[in-house]
Image (cartoon, rainbow, N blue to C red):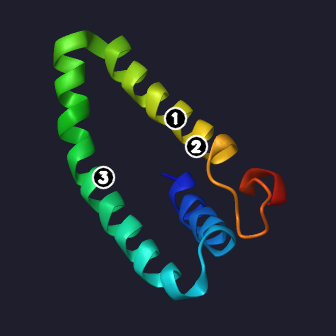
Amino acid sequence: MLALPRYGAILSIYATVLLPTRLRASVLTSAWAAGRIASAAAPCLLLRALASYGPHGMFAVLTAVLVASGVLLVGGPQGLSGKPVARTL
């Protein structure tokens, strides 16, 4: 819960490095809306994983999502400067 405000700030910084000014607001708004939908759907999906696979399966799903986020950050697209974003922040 404490990481959520920091994640929003990091997303804003990442967007300023990655996106041109004319696209930034619409892309950030779309990402924010997708995040709200995902946060509404996450409890349903995690409860289904918990019921089907137990706590280990549920935490495996959470771990996979966190690892995918890290891979996208480190190996994701390059910023406007042409350098990987994770190395310029």
Q: Is residue 22 above or below residue 58?
A: below
> At 59% across and 73% down in the image, what residue appears?
19
> Which badge, 2 or 3, comes first in the chain's sequence?
3
Q: Can you give x and y, in whole percent of width and height, for residue 2 in the image? A: 55, 54
Q: Which of marks 1 and 3 is nearer the N terminus?
A: 3
Residue type marked 3:
Ser
Between 34 and 41, the one nearer to me in the picture: 34
What is the C-alpha distance between the residues marked 1 and 3?
A: 17 Å
Identify the disc placed on residue 86: none
The front one of 19 and 65 is: 19
Mark 2: which amino acid?
Leu
* Spatial CA span between label 2 and label 3: 19 Å
**x and y percent of residue 64 in the render?**
46, 27
Residue under label 2, please give it: 72
Q: Position of residue 60 (x, y in %)?
A: 41, 19
Relative to 15, is 60 above or below?
A: above
Element type at mark 1: helix
- Quarter of image, res 5: bottom right
Q: In which quarter of the image is residue 70?
A: top right
- From the image, tell me which residue sits under label 1: 68
Residue at (77%, 62%) from the top-left corner? 82
Q: Residue 39 carries which label?
A: 3
Decide: marks 1, 2 in contact (CB < 8 A)? yes
- Residue 69, percent across and down? 54, 41
In the figure, is residue 50 to the left or right of 63?
left
Residue at position x 75%, y 52% in the image = 86
Report crowding for label 3: few under 14, some 14 to 19, many 20 or more residues within 10 A (C-alpha). Answer: few
The residue at the point 46 percent across, 73 percent down is 28
